[in-house]
Image (cartoon, rainbow, N blue to C red):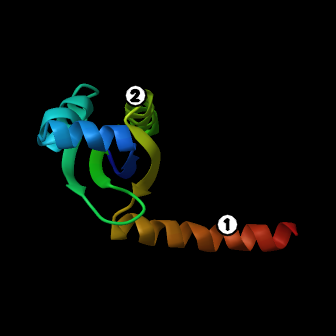
Amino acid sequence: MALYLHQLAYTPESWAAQVKSPANRVENVARAAVESIGGKLVGGWLCFGEYDAVFIFDLADEESMAALAIAVAAGGGIKASKTTLLMTAGQGVEALKKAATVGKTYKAAR
């Protein structure tokens, strides 16, 4: 399983619908959607800034995250989204070690 940060910005129409009918969409919508593909919702928050909401999902693979993002976008309630794969510190250290090997090969090949 991998962790993904998914940020989204609502359309004005989506905000209007939420104002008209306030509800915890993290629990009512996001959790059901991610669990339908075998994943887990780690958390979801509304926020200030470029994006209106952020979620952290624990999913099996990139295809699952892509499917979730596509389904959400197809619903028409968001105007923009962005997904970032999250790595643990240990995974980051392993990436740094691999980068040292790749760097040597890259320099030799130039």
**Farthest right residue in view:** 110
- The numbered mark at residue 25 is none
Q: Is residue 70 above or below residue 4?
A: above
Q: Is residue 54 above or below residue 39?
A: below
Residue at figure coordinates x 40%, y 40% from the top left: 78
Kind of residue sitting beneath label 2: Ala
- The quarter in which the C terminus is drawn is bottom right
Kind of residue sitting beneath label 1: Val
Q: Callout 2: 10 Å neighbours few (<14), some, many (20+)?
A: few
Side of 39 where 62 appears, left or right: right
Question: Residue 32, image x and y in percent?
Answer: 18, 30
Circle 2 sits in a helix, a strand or a loop, which is it? Answer: helix
N-terminal of the pair, mark 1 or mark 2, is 2
- Of residues 67 and 21, which is closer to you in this image? 21
Q: Is residue 17 visible?
A: yes
Label 2 sits on residue? 71
Q: Are marks 1 and 2 in contact (CB under 8 Å)?
A: no
Q: Is residue 108 above or below residue 69?
A: below
Q: Is residue 59 visible?
A: no
Circle 1 sits in a helix, a strand or a loop, which is it? Answer: helix
Question: Residue 65, image x and y in percent?
Answer: 40, 38
Question: Residue 29, image x and y in percent?
Answer: 20, 33
Residue at figure coordinates x 12%, y 43% from the top left: 24
Label 1 sits on residue? 102
Residue at figure coordinates x 19%, y 43% from the top left: 19
- The quarter in which the N terminus is drawn is top left
Side of 69 where 99 appears, left or right: right
